[in-house]
Image (tube, helix red, strand yellow):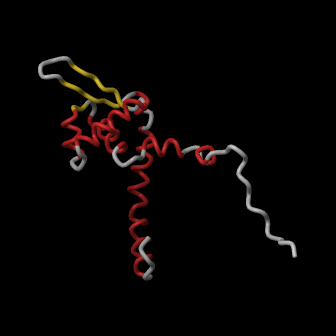
Amino acid sequence: MASTAPAPAARPAGKVPAEACPISPVVDLVFSRWTTPILWLLHEHGRQRFVELQRRIGTITPKVLTQRLRRMERDGLVVRTYHPEVPPRVEYEISPLGLSLAPLFRTLAEWSQTHLPEVAAARTDYDDRGQPMP
């Protein structure tokens, strides 16, 4: 007997998930564990030395901060300035490309102020129903 259920929608040949969701590359680029706090700090406080960034973030290791800053510099989100002094000084600042994310961060900050209490209430409701922890 033939099935009357509709066939699942086929993905066009060669279509990658990033094309199916055009914001996926941006999420991968900007919303990694440390990228967002670094960009936020550079936007809010301006040019920073490595130790200032590390101190403000608090829980990041020097190795991870170095890796993240290099990646962000490569992606064009941060500008690194080397000052050939004794001792040498290196400063980081958000680039114009990184600054272009400011409206997005502002919108997310507003969303979090408005909706995080709702998220907390939903979690409490879920937990009170005895649902398994995801």
Image location of residue 42, percent across then percent down: 30, 36
In the displayed structure, 29 sits above or below 73; it is: below
- Establish if 34 lies above or below 118: above
Of residue 34 and residue 43, the one placed in the foreground of this image is 34
Q: Is residue 79 above or below residue 8?
A: above
Tell me which corner region of the image, top left, top right, bottom left or bottom right, holds residue 123.
bottom left
The quadrant of the image that shows the C terminus is: bottom left
Q: In this view, does 88 lie to the left or right of 80?
A: left
Instruction: Name the residue nearer the viewer: 59 or 100.
Output: 59
Q: Is residue 70 left or right of residue 7?
A: left
Which residue is at the far front?
A: 1
Q: Is residue 81 above or below residue 61?
A: above
Quadrant position of residue 69: top left
Residue 117 in which image quadrant:
bottom left
- Give the left or right position of residue 121, taking residue 56 as reference: right
Question: At 26% from the left edge and 30% from the top edge, which residue is drawn?
Answer: 47
Q: Which residue is drawn at 79% across and 70% down?
A: 5
In the rendered image, the residue lying farthest to the left is 86
Q: Which residue is drawn at 42% across and 46% down?
A: 31
Number of labels in the image equals 0
Q: Where in the figure is residue 120, as x and y percent of width and height?
A: 39, 68
Quarter of the N terminus within the rendering? bottom right
Which is more toward the observer, 7 or 92? 7
Q: Kindly give the residue lying farthest to the top in the view shown.
A: 84
Question: Residue 13 placed where, x, y %?
Answer: 72, 46
Q: Position of residue 111 (x, y in %)?
A: 44, 54
- Identify the residue at image location x=26%, y=36%: 45
